[in-house]
Amino acid sequence: MRIDGKAFLLLLGAGTLALGVATVWLWPKLAGSGAKALTGRISLLLGTQLSLAATFLFAVNAWGGFYTSWGQLFGTASAKYTLVDQGTANADRYDVQALDGVSRSSRPSHLGRSLGASLSGLRSGLTAGLQIYPPSDYAARREEHHRFPVEVVDLTGGATGLSAPEYQQIANTYQVMVVVVTGDTQEIPGVDVPDSEQGQLFWAQDLQTALSAHYRIDPYAPDWGIAGVGQDGTAAVNLAVQDPSHYGLAAAAGDWTHTDPLQSWPGVDKYLASVPMPGISLLYDPTPGDVPQKLRASSGALRITQQRGLTLLGELRWLGKSIDANADARA
Amino acid sequence: MNLTGSLFLALLAVLTVAAFTGVILLWRRLSKRDWHAVLGRIGVLGGAQLMVVVLVAALANDYFGFYGSWHELFGVASASNETGQNVIGSPAGARVAGRRHQFVTVEQVSGLNVPGGSAPAVTGQTQDVAIQGAITGLSTQAIVYLPPQYFQPAYAHYRFPAAIISTGYPGDLGALENRLKYPYRLLTGIKGRTDKPIVLVMTQPSPTSVGGIDTECTNVPGGPQVATFWAQDIPTAIEQAYPRVAAGPKAWGLMGDSTGGDCALKVSMMNSDRFAAAVSLSGDYNAAEDLTTGNLYKTGQFRDENDPMWRVRHLPKPPIAVLLASSLSGENDLPEVIEFARLTKGTPLRTSTLLRNEGGHNFATWNAEIAPALQWLTNTLASPTPLPQV
């Protein structure tokens, strides 16, 4: 009879019930004053109680699947096991391969120039085109131990970007890597939309690990900024709000407050109601209105800057200045 | 009075014996053949039976380490759940401002009591700590085990890999040390040169501040962000408080039994840039929702996201190594383990398996699996510094 089988449990249950009924039924017969009656009382009651204890324990055991054979209970079950080891995952190799167009064996002088690449998100499955602008002295010998902050420009929603010289100037002025991301087919949200685009996996994990696999990148979240216009601005804000350990700075221009609520899952205000204010800095254009309640003013560790008529260039300059301020604070 | 203390058990035992004696003493008074007496018999018998069930439940809870406190049993959150009002900024923010906040409070330090003494350089050291989550505002009790090498001069410049180890739900934190003996098993493996020294951070699936709800390590929409607490807050706090713990994904792993195994697998799949390896002993593979979890996921789509089987079927396989343990006979997760291994074959996700001939959802099974699983984990994690030749 199986230890966790219905038959065994039913038998135990029926036994307990029968003993209970028998106790009530036989009660008067065992009410005598002799030692025999007393022994009878004690035995019957003890039997009823032990039977119930056993029923209870075996029922809990069957419910939880704890001991599934008598052998396990009594320690006589086979202790043999087989371990099939498939080894480590070697994530580095995949992160290097995820960025196509940048060769790891390239001489530093090659990496120091702006170049185009494509990213196949290892974790998100999303793909995007990248234009990478290192500061022009990235490859200089005196910079060889310098790790650079990053300004990500999200253009996956199709907004018009800046010119290459403008990006390069931002990179040089603020000593940052400027990484322009363009979508293949769709905009990439800042959160993992349930059953849909895994935007947070893309921005926080795929992009950061792939860039770090090729470039000397500052891994410090407050030195990672992201900027977008319109729905890409929504993505930028959501990303920093919900993932401050990957992005400490975000900027949103244009109409960034009127996007599909799913792109902000589970919702900025709903999310922020359950956590302390994140230690991030946000810049946004308040003109479109309907700014999430909790982002309307600085609060706790959250820093808010508003600027009407904000442009993409203005966003990138603000990111650069914020990164400079981080460096000053550290110094 | 502690739920698991001997005082409580003694009190229950006394009450059970008293109830038993009471029934024997009242026996003659209730022996008439009228319905008053019959009702009386049923009443006193029921009372005595109830006491037996309560005593047996308390003994089983004590033995199997389900609920460690009244607060865990009745689901009352501790006071520090006030969305982290006492947390001032994130560690990142703190560093920007040029200040450092401590997110780990050491409450008690003990040696490991094994033959050969309890000197830290010989047996290592356990520290009972409270971990405060900078991002999530959640907080939890944990036990940190520092291996003996942590205290040996030869390892002064070695960076130790670390793993978060979890109980199931319900599960008593102390059981990891006393019943499953993680520190002792790791120490034995290190001494036998089969295991490499790593730091263990032993905790529970639901942080202490969340109270008695099984969160399955989920970022509950509008609720506690437990996945983030595991993936970001715990490693950040530990790396800051123990600077010789290595940072970076290759050095961090996750391991647990039952719900702790669910958490290890799910959190590593969602955060493969933070963790390299995970071990799930007798885990679930279906984003369970039951009486203890309540409505965790709110929508079916979000539940899918938290379902490891859905993730391997519908999302790219993240670059992590996992060890899934089950039994060929006696455990119901075996088909899922086999399917998970099949679906991930030849992908960046490496699935190793530990299959016992026979086992169940019990300590006997896990006690037998922990030693080989720890050996796998400590050899799968990697330190950025070479292991000293001692």
Image: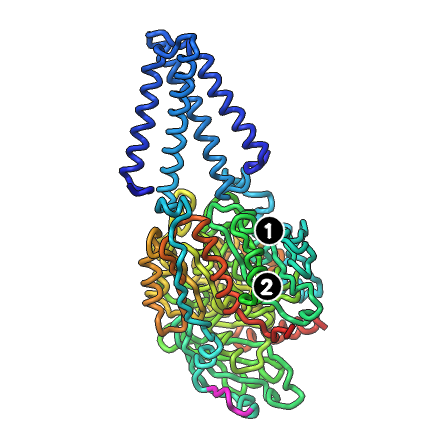
What kind of secondary structure does the magenta stretch mostly adopt? loop
User: Which of the pair A221/A68 is nearer the observer?
Assistant: A68
Image quarter hosting the C terminus of chain B: bottom right
Residue B199 locus on image (x, y percent): 59, 62
| Left or right: where B243 falls relative to B165 | right
Specify the quadrant of the image occupied by residue A264.
Answer: bottom left
Front one among A5 and B236? A5
On the image, the x and y values in percent for residue B134 come to: 60, 57
What residue do we see at 35% from left, 46% from top? A69
For disc 1, the neighbor class at 10 Å (few under 14, some 14 to 19, many from 20) is many
Front one among B161 and B141? B161
Say if the magenta span includes residue A127.
Answer: no
In the depicted structure, whether residue B34 falls above or below residue B280: above
Q: Is residue A80 above or below residue A110?
A: above
- In front: mark 2 or mark 1? 2
Give the image location of residue B297, x and y in percent: 40, 52
Precedes in sequence: disc 2 or disc 1:
1
Tag 2: amino acid: Lys
* Above or below, A174 relative to B230: below
The reply to whether residue B158 is visible in this rendering is yes
Q: For the residues marked 2 and 1, what is the alpha-carbon distance in whole angstroms?
A: 41 Å
Q: How many marks?
A: 2
Which amino acid type is shown beneath numbered disc 1?
A: Gly
Confirm whether residue A306 shows in the render: no
Residue, disc 2: B191
Most extreme residue toward the left is A7
* Residue that mark 1 sits on: B84
Magenta stretch bounds: A102-107
Chain letter behind tag 2: B
Q: Chain of mark 1?
A: B
Q: For residue A283, what is the image quadrant?
A: bottom right
